[in-house]
């Protein structure tokens, strides 16, 4: 976070810097704060979520403010999570957010797979 910046503003700024997507603060919903360092995770993570289906059709182009931090930006299916090497265990964050926010939209097989992986990591707390 920058000086005199809210957590929502920091989230929106980081998304813009790393993906070149502009995110309206009004669509960001607070999810959790995690201040326990585990594995590769940074010491403090503040999670917001948003559901904006029109982003799925938006092409992401342009230069990123921090090109050394981003290799590639693309939309992927939840079934493809295991195909990528995620920094800071973000694959587990995606699974956790999916179960909290979108459980009713997920296929049963995906729910079972995510729950098993999160249990293995002791990160199944889906009641944020």
Image (cartoon, helix red, strand yellow):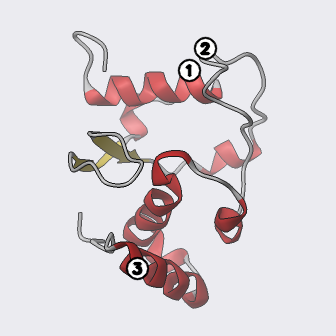
Residue marked by disc 2? 65
For mark 2, give the secondary structure: loop
Say whether marks 3 and 1 touch (CB < 8 Å).
no
Alpha carbons under labels 3 and 2: distance apart: 36 Å
* CA distance separating discs 2 and 1: 5 Å
CB atoms of marks 2 and 1 within 8 Å: yes
Q: Is residue 18 above or below residue 96?
A: above
Q: Is residue 84 left or right of residue 24?
A: right
Q: Nearer the viewer, residue 80 or 12?
A: 80
**Distance from label 3 to label 1 (Cα)?**
33 Å
Residue 98 x/y as whole percent:
47, 66
In the rendered structure, which disc, 2 or 1, sits on the residue that comes first in sequence? 1
Q: Residue at position x 21%, y 45% from top?
A: 35
Residue at image location 40% in from the left, 30% down from the top: 11
Quarter of the image with the N terminus is top left
Q: Which mark is residue 106?
A: none
Compare marks 3 and 1 and give the one earlier in the sequence.
1
Q: In the rendered image, which residue does mark 1 sit on?
A: 17
Q: How far across and how far down the image is residue 121, in percent?
A: 38, 72
In screen coordinates, is 41 left or right of 54?
left
């Amino acid at each position: 976070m920058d000086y005199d910046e809210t957590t929502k503003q920091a989230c929106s700024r980081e998304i813009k810097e790393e993906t070149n997507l502009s995110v309206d603060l009004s669509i960001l919903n607070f999810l959790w704060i995690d201040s326990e360092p585990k594995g590769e995770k940074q010491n403090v993570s503040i999670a917001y979520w948003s559901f904006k289906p029109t982003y799925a059709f938006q092409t992401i182009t342009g230069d990123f403010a921090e090109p050394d931090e981003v290799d590639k930006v693309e939309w992927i299916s939840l079934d493809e999570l295991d195909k990528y090497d995620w920094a800071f265990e973000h694959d587990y964050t995606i699974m956790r957010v999916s179960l909290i926010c979108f459980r009713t939209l997920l296929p049963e097989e995906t729910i079972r797979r995510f729950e098993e992986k999160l249990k293995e990591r002791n990160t199944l707390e889906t009641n944020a």
